[in-house]
Image: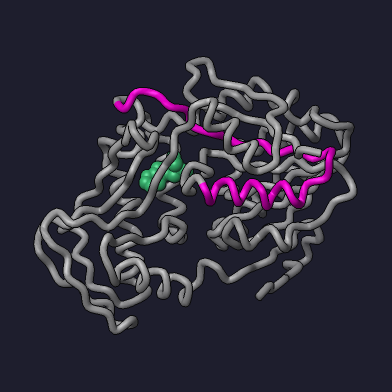
Amino acid sequence: MVRTSELGKDKRLKVLRLDSNQAPDFAAAVRAGLSGTPKSIPSRFFYDDIGSDLFEQITELPEYYLTRSEQSIFEERADTIVGFAKKPISLVEFGSGSSKKTRLLIEAALRQQAALSYAAVDISEDYLESTARRLLKDYPALSVTAIASEYFDSLDIIPQANCPRLFLFLGSNIGNLEDDEAQRFLARIKSSMASEDRLLVGMDLEKDASIIEPAYDDLEGITARFDKNVLARANRELGANFDLDSFVHRARYSQVRSRVEVALISQREQDVSISELDLDFHLSLGEPIHTEISRKYGLEDVQRLARGAGLTLADRWFDSQNWFGLFMFKPDL
Ligand code: TRP
């Protein structure tokens, strides 16, 4: 169900909501993920208000190179990137978070055109709205459509535009999808693209495990808190009795699968109950609850994904260490 509000007096902000991060979805996902083995909880439920704040802290950690690498590409290339079509253009972003990197594109676009519309999709509703308000304050020529939704559902309600659109899927968020899901999502985006539109995807590249693993398991323990927040959220929202101290955050890079695999490992035999689900289950010593994957890409992987989705690679840019790539795709004709 879509709920719309044109908030307050601000004609430049429109908020749309799809209830894909709400209590019934969380309850159903937790029940499905914890009833059998192996156990898992889908990672989109990391991002309540507390989780979104913790993720913002992750992006500033010394170990978490991804955000800085991607930002450095935008700092050098923002003008080139928004130069893909005759102005004006508009922006559509999936998983916008704090929109910090997007600011560089917004500023580049506004140097070349008088006004800009930006549709931002994010699962975390309150976070999305406060980000949108800050953007509107900073950029008087901007208008924002804030869409609180998970990625797939949002595609049906993204506003049409009568100018070329740049779709953004940054931060290697694509890597949190299984390969087949990633391909299906890109194919869905492609099906809503006009021939002038472009899709810019930020993808973390394959590299040594000694660089990747600390990015997902920092010394300060912020990532561990972020990971465990999904259990804390189950305690808060579903009446679960997870003892957070009896789980350890684990992030391992699998060379074979080119991906980080994140899990919470039970440190003892234990029984957990979730009162609002009427669910009791057992965890053995060392048993994982899988929470996230983060795929790292080789250039062939990028090409394969594009081909499978009906997209052609039009351009690509890397940071000075070749750790992170921005890939610009156009729809096949
Ligand atoms: N999109 C981010 C990434 O894959 C998500 C992320 C960063 C994450 N750190 C994490 C997910 C730690 C789970 C645990 O890099």
x then y, percent, for residue 233: 35, 66
Q: Nearer the viewer, residue 208 or 115?
A: 208
In the picture, the quarter occupied by the N terminus is bottom right
**Which picture quadrant has residue 140?**
top right
x then y, percent, for residue 279: 27, 80
In the image, residue 333 above or below residue 320: below
- Left or right: where 278 falls relative to 328: left
> Which residue sits at x=85%, y=51%?
161
> Which residue sits at x=85%, y=30%?
112
Residue 56 visible in the picture:
no
**Which picture quadrant has residue 18?**
bottom right
Region rendered in magenta: 180-209
x then y, percent, for residue 118: 74, 48
x then y, percent, for residue 243: 19, 65
Residue 90 visible in the picture:
yes
> Which residue sits at x=84%, y=40%?
195
Q: Nearer the viewer, residue 331 or 122?
A: 331
- Left or right: where 293 falls relative to 113: left
Is-magenta flag for residue 152? no
